[in-house]
Image (cartoon, helix red, strand yellow):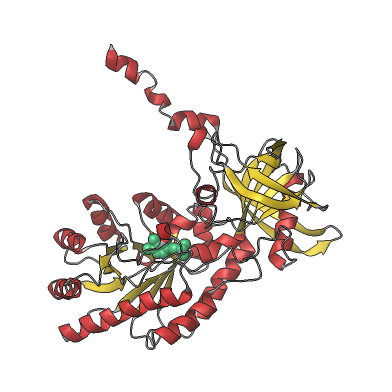
């Protein structure tokens, strides 16, 4: 894995460089906005097109985007506009998916924990849902009106094994999601459940995330396909008509030359699961990271630098509040970092080993350890590449730090002498201090004093 500080001059790195320069010139990045997220809309469109193309031969595929990977209404609307559906896992994600304009029939509710009200609402809307357990199948059965339009499935855990990263592996023997298929008696209980509930027509699996090989993911899909065949054979009818095959493809850490992994994944599926793509089953995919990560970056002002124990540290405004997983899992979620000067131009100069630290008040708030970069100084900017998924879109409220602003951008072709012009659009406003106070219980400021009175 290369973490080279100066990315190759791919079209997307040229667009990022242009965006940084124009964002600094426009004041979107600087004193007034010391950290912000940026989404490359042409890049997103390109990934969606690559996904559709990779599956072009398979009839009847619904590609859903896992909302948690970029839970921002304008981003979801862009994806809806490109023909995607949406995978949601909470009432909040369902709400923003509906606000983004996804038709209920193209939304799949997959949360591991659902209240009765959430299930009722999904059924009333006609949103598809996957039960996480046989217990939940019984709960859905008790709430389901006989004319419900929702497609209903069962999530299974094929237990094909975990990937390299425990916290995001979902198909190890003891993983939380879905019915564990290799446990004694589990297959029979699943078949009995399908026999008892003819409206149960889908199986769903999501074998993993970053850290699982394409072969492992394909093996999990293969197990699920075989179970569908077994259910239909044992019931003597084609009851299972759809397979949710999840997402989990790696992206981002391989650098920009890697490109979207979808064609390679489809090839792995073809090898591992002949018959999967022949149209007998409606397929539902659920990609997040691999669609979005490479098409977003975080820009942050360097506020100061210092030396500590012989190590140079650049103190920036990007830390655990916006790159949470990288800070807490630095080995498994390393980020490429770029150094830019006060005008937003890529910095040159000899490499110096530096830590890139964030604004949170704990010592471990470091987004890159011992990274070789041109020497950073106060007033410069750092760019955290490949942060379009699970980073600025899912901020952490530690230290009452505000959610950073997010902008979409487009490099306009017909470049002038200084490279392409860049247009920006607001995606999410930076959180205000009023909003922070309100979300910190301001409306109840006296409540504890009154309790004691
Ligand atoms: C998170 C998740 C996805 C997307 O995972 P990525 O690694 O972002 O592709 C898909 N399906 C389910 C059920 C998920 O929980």
Q: Image quadrant for the N terminus? A: bottom right
Q: Is residue 264 visible?
A: yes
Q: Quadrant of ligand 1?
A: bottom left
Examine the image and state in which quarter residue 127 appears: bottom left
Furthest-right residue in view? 417
Q: Is residue 222 above or below residue 131?
A: below
Nearest the camera: 305 or 285? 305
Furthest-top residue in view? 453
Left/right placement of residue 231 relative to residue 391 reads left
Position of residue 259 measured from the top left corner of the image (x, y, whole percent): 61, 71
Q: Image quadrant for the C terminus? A: top left
Nearest the camera: 219 or 371? 371
Q: Residue at x 36, y 64 (%)?
A: 170
Position of residue 229 measured from the top left corner of the image (x, y, whole percent): 26, 84
Q: Is residue 434 above or below residue 285?
A: above
Position of residue 407 measured from the top left corner of the image (x, y, whole percent): 62, 50
Position of residue 365 measured from the top left corner of the image (x, y, whole percent): 56, 41
Left/right placement of residue 154 relative to residue 274 reads left
Q: Is residue 16 above or below residue 272?
A: above
Q: Residue at x 26, y 58 (%)?
A: 124
Left/right placement of residue 26 relative to residue 449 reads right
The number of callouts visible is: 0
Nearest the camera: 138 or 337? 337
Examine the image and state in which quarter residue 167 appears: bottom left
Q: Is residue 87 visible?
A: no
């Amino acid at each position: 894995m290369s973490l080279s500080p100066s990315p190759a001059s791919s079209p997307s790195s040229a667009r990022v460089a242009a965006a940084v320069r124009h964002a600094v010139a426009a004041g979107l990045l600087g004193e007034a906005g010391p950290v912000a997220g940026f989404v490359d809309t042409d890049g997103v469109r390109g990934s969606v097109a690559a996904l559709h193309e990779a599956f072009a031969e398979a009839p009847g595929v619904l590609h859903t985007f896992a909302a948690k990977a970029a839970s921002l209404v304008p981003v979801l609307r862009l994806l809806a506009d490109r023909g995607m559906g949406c995978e949601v896992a909470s009432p909040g994600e369902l709400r923003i998916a509906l606000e983004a304009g996804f038709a209920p029939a193209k939304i799949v509710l997959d949360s591991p924990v659902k209240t009765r009200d959430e299930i009722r609402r999904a059924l009333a809307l006609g949103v598809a849902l996957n039960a996480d357990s046989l217990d939940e199948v019984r709960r859905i059965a008790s709430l389901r009106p006989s004319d419900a339009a929702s497609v209903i499935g069962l999530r299974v855990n094929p237990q094909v094994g975990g990937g390299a990263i425990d916290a995001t592996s979902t198909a190890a023997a003891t993983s939380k999601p879905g019915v564990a298929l290799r446990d004694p008696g589990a297959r029979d209980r699943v078949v009995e459940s399908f026999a008892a509930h003819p409206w149960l027509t889908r199986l769903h699996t999501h074998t993993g995330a970053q850290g699982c090989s394409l072969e492992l993911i394909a093996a999990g899909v293969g197990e699920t396909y075989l179970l569908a065949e077994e259910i239909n054979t044992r019931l003597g009818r084609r009851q299972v008509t759809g397979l949710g095959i999840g997402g989990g493809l790696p992206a981002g850490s391989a650098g920009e030359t890697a490109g979207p992994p979808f064609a390679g994944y489809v090839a792995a599926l073809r090898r591992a699961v002949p018959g999967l793509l022949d149209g007998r089953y409606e397929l539902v995919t659920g990609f997040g990271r691999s669609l979005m990560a490479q098409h977003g970056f975080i820009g942050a002002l360097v506020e100061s630098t210092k030396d500590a124990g012989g190590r140079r540290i650049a103190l920036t405004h990007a830390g655990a509040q916006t790159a949470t997983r990288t800070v807490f899992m630095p080995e498994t979620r390393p980020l490429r970092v770029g150094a830019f000067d006060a005008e937003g131009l890529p910095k040159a100069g000899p490499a110096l080993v530096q830590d890139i630290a964030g604004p949170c008040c704990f010592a471990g708030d470091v987004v890159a350890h011992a990274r070789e970069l041109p020497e950073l100084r106060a007033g410069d900017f750092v760019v955290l590449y490949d942060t379009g998924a699970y980073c600025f879109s899912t901020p952490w409220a530690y230290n009452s730090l505000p959610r950073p602003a997010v902008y979409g951008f487009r490099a306009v072709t017909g470049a002038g002498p200084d490279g392409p012009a860049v247009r920006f659009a607001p995606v999410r406003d930076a959180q205000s201090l009023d909003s922070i106070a309100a979300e910190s219980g301001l409306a109840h400021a006296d409540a504890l004093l009154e309790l004691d009175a």
